[in-house]
Image: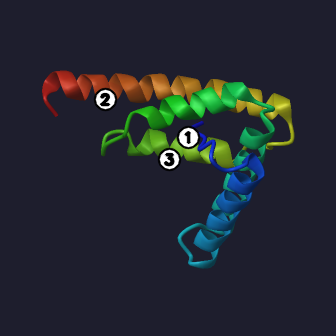
Amino acid sequence: MIVNHRYPAEQLYTEMARVIDALRIKGQLSGEEGTCLLDLLDLICAGTSPELNRALEQVLEVPGNSDTVEIDEIIKGTLMGTDSKSMEDVAQAVGIIRELNRERNRILSDNDKSGG
């Protein structure tokens, strides 16, 4: 996670929570999506699952394309279906996300090789 060290962690957390809530109010996020993002924010800020942080960073490292939309949606669904208070559930989600990301990267690599 990229952190701007000019601001205290509490201020970053509060600002991110405010942005998520504003997006929900504007209708750009569903209630479920907003709740999921707030749960992820809690996990990331608490540092309770560095494996989840790494898995999400790896997914976000490389932009997807039209061929990876389905995988991206499955990753989103996996995150939304994860009980962030259950470390067992989070660990299982990390494994699923890593597998999906491997497939996503394979598709992107194949596209690069074929010029698409």
Q: Where is residue 48 in the image (x, y as percent from the top left)?
A: 81, 32
Instruction: Residue 51: give its label.
Output: none
Q: Where is residue 51 in the image (x, y as percent from the top left)?
A: 68, 25
Q: Mark 2 points at which residue?
A: 108
Lower sequence index among marks 1 and 2: 1
How far apart in space, not on screen, are marks 1 and 3 (Cα)?
5 Å
Lower sequence index among marks 3 and 2: 3
How far apart in space, not on screen, are marks 3 and 2 (Cα)?
16 Å
Query: Element at badge 3?
Result: helix
For mark 3, does the 10 Å Cα neighbourhood hold few (<14), some (14 to 19), or many (20 or more) residues? few
Above-or-below relation of 46 to 18:
above
Q: Name the residue under label 1.
A: 75
Q: Where is residue 103 in the image (x, y as percent from the top left)?
A: 43, 25
Q: Is residue 66 left or right of residue 90?
A: left
Query: Element at badge 2?
Result: helix
Q: Which amino acid does label 3 sit on?
A: Glu
Q: Mark 3 points at which residue?
A: 73
Q: What residue type is labelled 1?
A: Ile
What residue do we see at 36% from left, 40% from top? 64
